[in-house]
Amino acid sequence: MAQNFISGKNGYVNVEGVAYSFGKWRCPMTAGTPKVFNFNGGGFEQYVSGLIGAKVTLEGPWDVGNMPLVVGNTYTFTLGVSVSVFLTVAGIVNSVEPSNDVEDTPKVTVGVQVSGSFTPSIT
């Protein structure tokens, strides 16, 4: 397989179709693995695939007045790597953390709990 690395400079975050000025996003996707240990397991642990979920973290400069997000509200987020490579998830904003540093610009970090179905994969 040929390598196909790309730069992060083409990334983006859209919320409800509107571009937001975040500079970083993360979206760990997980599957629960419930134990199914039993006497017939030959002495080995056994698991099954369980509930699938994801959490999104958005970070970047605080674009004051242009980032209307409300904790507790559900939004659709498009998390882009490039125009053709992106994830789309619906999730509940469960945290908004603005911060300020005298030696830097004000920043904001937003946490999102994905709710409902999504495609838990990458290409």
Image (spheres, grey):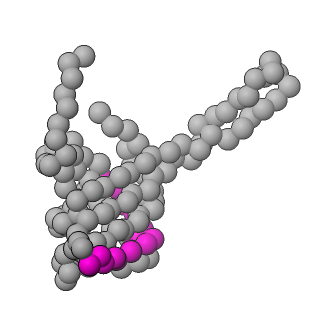
**Which residue does the image show at 45% across and 52% down from the upper left?**
54
* Residue 91: in magenta span: yes
**What secondary structure prevails in the magenta region?**
strand
Q: Residue furthest bottom?
A: 65
Q: Is residue 73 visible?
A: no
Classify residue 42 as left or right of residue 108: right
Of residues 25 and 44, which is closer to you in this image? 25
**Which residue does the image show at 56% across and 47% down from the upper left?**
51
Please identify the quadrant where the C terminus is shown. Answer: top left
Q: Position of residue 104 (x, y in %)?
A: 23, 72
Magenta segment? 88-102
Q: Is residue 78 above or below residue 2?
A: below
Classify residue 117 as left or right of residue 37: left
Quadrant of res 67: bottom left
Q: Residue furthest front?
A: 103
Q: Position of residue 85 (x, y in %)?
A: 21, 42
Q: Position of residue 65 (x, y in %)?
A: 19, 83
Q: Position of residue 94 (x, y in %)?
A: 45, 71
**Which residue does the image show at 67% across and 33% down from the upper left?**
47
Q: Residue furthest right?
A: 39
Q: Is residue 32 visible?
A: yes
Classify residue 40 as left or right of residue 56: right
